[in-house]
Amino acid sequence: MSLTLIVLLPFIGAVLPAIMIRAGRNACATATGSITLLALILLMAKAPAVISGEVFQVSYSWLPELGLNVTFFLDGLGLLFATLILGIGLLIIIYARFYLSKDDPMGRFYAFLLLFQGAMVGIVLSDNILLLLVFWELTSLSSFLLIGYWKHLPEGRQGARMALAVTGAGGLAMIAGMLILGDIVGSYDLTVILQNADLIQASPMYVPALVLILLGCFTKSAQFPFHFWLPHAMAAPTPVSAYLHSATMVKAGIFLMARMWPVLSGTPEWFYIVATAGLVTMVLGAWIAIFKHDLKGLLAYSTVSHLGLITMLLGFGTPIAAVAGVFHIINHATFKAALFMTAGIIDHETGTRDIRRLGGLLNLMPIAGTIGIISAASMAGIIPLNGFLSKEMMLEEAWHTMWLDQGWVVPLLATVGAIFSVAYSFRFIFHVWMGKPRDENLPHHPHDPPFGMWGPPALLTVLVVLIGLFPAVIAGPLVAATSSAVIGGELPEYHLALWHGLTPALGMSVIAIVVGALLLMRHGALISATANLSRPDAKAMFDCAIAKLVALSRVISDNLHNGSLQRYLSVMIVASVAIGVSGFYAEPDHTAGTRELLDVSPAAAIGWVLLVVTSIAAVVMHHNRLLSLLLVGVIGLIVSLGFIYLSAPDLALTQISVEVVTVILMLLALNILPKETPKESLPGRKLRDGVVSIAAGLGIGGAIWAIMTRDLPNSISAYHLANSKIEGGGTNVVNVILVDFRGFDTFGEIIVLGIAALSIFALIETVTQGEAAKRLANWVVSNRRSADRHPMMMVVATRVMLPLSLMVGVYIFLRGHNEPGGGFIAGLVVSVALVMQYMASGFGWTQNRMKVNYHGMIGLGVIAAAITGASAWVAGLPFLTSGFVHVHLPIVGEFELASAMGFDLGVFLTVVGAVMLALAKLSQVERMAEHIDVNLDPMDHDPSVRIATPEKEA
Amino acid sequence: MEFLVASSIGLLTTCGTYLLLRGRTFPVVIGLALLSYAVNVFLFAMGRLTINMPPILREGVTEYTDPLPQALVLTAIVISFGMTALIVVLSIRTFLEIGNDHVDGQPVGEPSEAGDKN
């Protein structure tokens, strides 16, 4: 349990600094530090047991179907890394409190830092590789936030982007590699994978998995040729550089190589990829570091070089090299974090990090100077510091390593790397701390920083010395526990000691120190000698590659995604047809259906002929929009008739009333839109569309033919028929299904209808602004309009019909539960009755008499349906369970009251509200375009007024 | 009878699709209406065709047509009205905003980059 807590604490704690910053910077730092300290204490409580060989494990199911579970385990390797992450993290938190200036948002900094810390601890403690990948990506994201923390600096933003792009891309590759690995083993649990080395190395997928996983590791740990992002990430605040880019995140790749060492290493592929990449990185990084004038740049390339060293040791694949690698991880973390913090102190105190302007600082800031010099000496590998020990071990291993059967390659290059390493380390010592101040006009007058800033690196430096002097006592147990976890077997024989006698490694060390010192003495000459060498600028190359990628994706998307909706639609239709056809041919045997078919009656034949003629005519004559609209009306009518004929009275009623409203709506639209469609399709285009459409039609027609000629398999319909009366209390099964059995669907549907109406409202309401308003204001009114807009005959007729049609609506509504009808149909009928008034008597006149808020009506409808549904809860039944009672009234007789009627009322109100809102809004545009005031008189030519007028005049 | 219905659905689909592929908004709206008919009748026909067997329970009657597709199609008809209304208004708004009724929504004087005029 406490293992999970160690991982979760930083994540939970990430909220704290954001809140605590209100209480001041000290409170914020204290809260953050306490979180890390707590996690560290929990970890340390387990440390003795882990060092003695115990492995802690916890496991919770998360998505077992995917093999993704929350499982953590703590062994020696996990302990080492978790200690580094939490321990150095704690020091960094203290250091950052004094490093960050008053203007920097500290709460955000600590929140990001804890987020990162949690992700790192997650990586090193995960027992599930999928979970590990999640944390892996989280470190990329949180380091992106941290590198770009000073978001006002372009270097920070660019560095953050580059780091995210490189490590993110590597992470993607690693996901693939891990999935392959899990597939080979059949489990995503690390503990299982680690026991299947033979299975993995025998698999043909071993090399792809290895390469993909290594891509992830190399990008994260800045190995050649992916090393270039790390120096650019140095734009981050120094605490971030010290934490992420020396001690933790860049070690994540190393960690994973160490974690996977038992299963992946030992093959020639592993050796040549990993050891070579490490060797090249070590030499190259150290070489570049010599020429960096920026303190952090020097340290960044030095880090690249040291990461290469560790990678190379892991790549050798021998247990003893792995032990050396583990030991160097510890040593590098201690001296490099201290050096970064020292660089931060120098920057903070002098205002510059340019080595050319620094010098003689030891006299001015003796404490920081001592720390810096000792750590840098350890980095150079000077006896008796810890850097010397692991470098000796490295050189010893290099001495024994054959590369392509050549015994001299690795020792030579390792010595060269060590020489460069000594050179840049000495440069850090002599050019910064020794000699005379080179620039008297430094931005600040340097002096030692407050304890909070030098304390953390001092502690690390003490460790540097102690490990150097008493390696077996101080670091021995941890190295042993970690190494046995890495190797996964018996530890080789090794001695952590200062003196091993006169070994080749010692000779190489001596050569390195002497030549390195000579190199530094000739530093000026070296700089001028190499000044004309062309140096590939990684950033320019990276930016160029990114620009090319962007251009390429633009070309691809512009060609595929060219803005032509017609093209997208054709692609979709063709794809649908293709899927259907491939499905059809996937089944080799196709027999004709055996269902008995219905006879064709003459009426049906006539309807069919009409439908065929009107459909074709609607296409052929679609340029005449009014005509095509009328033809659609005819088609709708035939479809309604078809529904009646085929035992669907409810559908017929719905279809025919919808038809009326739709035609009115489209007529209104056609008043604004052009009346003709220009003939602009080229013949080729028509042919293409025709072929696509015919294919679609044949596919759909064939599918439904195949369905209809086969019998209906058992469906749930029989249940609805059997229970409609008993449970729903109605004999119209379709209506009972709508308001009861599948009431929840209907509830959703009326909400959709309401949303559609409100969207229409929003679209029209904003038409009074911008381009649209200008066009409406300049609208040229067509003179093809009726002289008598509101003819008397129609006004009178509709007014007489209003009560009748409303009555029909009520009747259809009431009987809906038992006979064809119901809320949908009644709502449409009532809407038609109301629309007739608007059409006949004009908008203004009707609106003055129809004081109904249609928005409210939609809302009321949805609420009524919801309340009816929810009232079932009162009776302890599920949502929308309906009840019904039989009521006996005098005169009326016995009738039934179903709660579903309340629901149907909601449907009714929503339909009326939605239809009326849509039409009313459309007519508003018309009125704006026609520049007419709303009429307050019902008729243009009122007979009574016309008779009265001459009399008055007379 | 089944053939008549199947061929009608196929024909409506063909006509609807063809109009959907036109370059102006109004034919697209008409095409969508035709396609809605086709889809609604298609869904309805999933319950197989019957004559004189409406799903209204009566004493002594045991055979009814399948009520379920009918219920689903009924709401589909209403919803497709809502959608038709929405795209009609969208097309009007587009027309008012850009001064033409081309579906790609390119303002006047800026011909579609695609050159994919219908």
Image: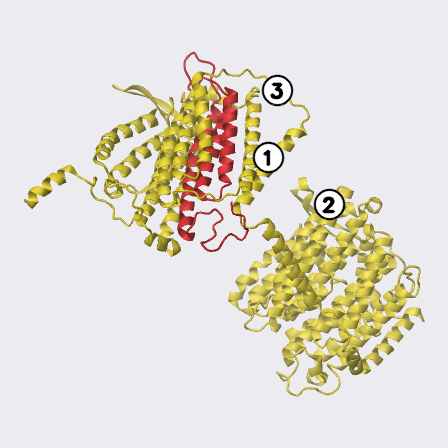
Chain colours: A yellow, B red
Q: Residue furthest top?
A: B60
Specify whether A770 is left or right of A805: right
Q: Position of residue A216 (x, y in %)?
A: 73, 55
Against A454, residue A749 (above or below) is above
- Badge 1 or badge 3: first in the primary sequence: 1
Taking the spot 49% from the left edge, 53% from the top edge, the residue there is B111
Residue at the disc numbered 2: A188
- Badge 3 or badge 2: first in the primary sequence: 2
Q: Using a 10 Å C-alpha cutoff, classify the residue at mark 3 as few (fewer than 14 neighbours), some (14 to 19) or many (20 or more).
A: few
> Of helix, strand and loop, which one carries label 3?
loop
Q: Nearer the viewer, residue A448 or A888?
A: A888
* Cα gap from disc 1 to disc 2, whole angstroms: 40 Å
Of circles 1 and 2, the one toward us is 1
**For the C terminus of chain A, which image quadrant?**
top left
> Of helix, strand and loop, which one carries label 2?
loop
Amino acid type, residue under disc 3 in the picture: Ala
Amino acid type, residue under disc 1 in the picture: Val
Q: Position of residue A16 (x, y in %)?
A: 56, 60
Q: Using a 10 Å C-alpha cutoff, classify the residue at mark 1 as few (fewer than 14 neighbours), some (14 to 19) or many (20 or more).
A: many
Specify whether A183 is left or right of A397: left
> Of helix, strand and loop, which one carries label 1?
helix
Specify whether A38 is left or right of A495: left
* Cα gap from disc 3 to disc 2, whole angstroms: 49 Å
- Badge 1 or badge 2: first in the primary sequence: 2
Against B57, residue A704 (above or below) is below
Taking the spot 57% from the left edge, 27% from the top edge, the residue there is A703
Badge 1 and badge 3 both on one subunit:
yes
Residue A577: assigned label: 1
Badge 1 and badge 2 both on one subunit:
yes
Chain on which label 1 sits: A
Residue at the disc numbered 3: A592
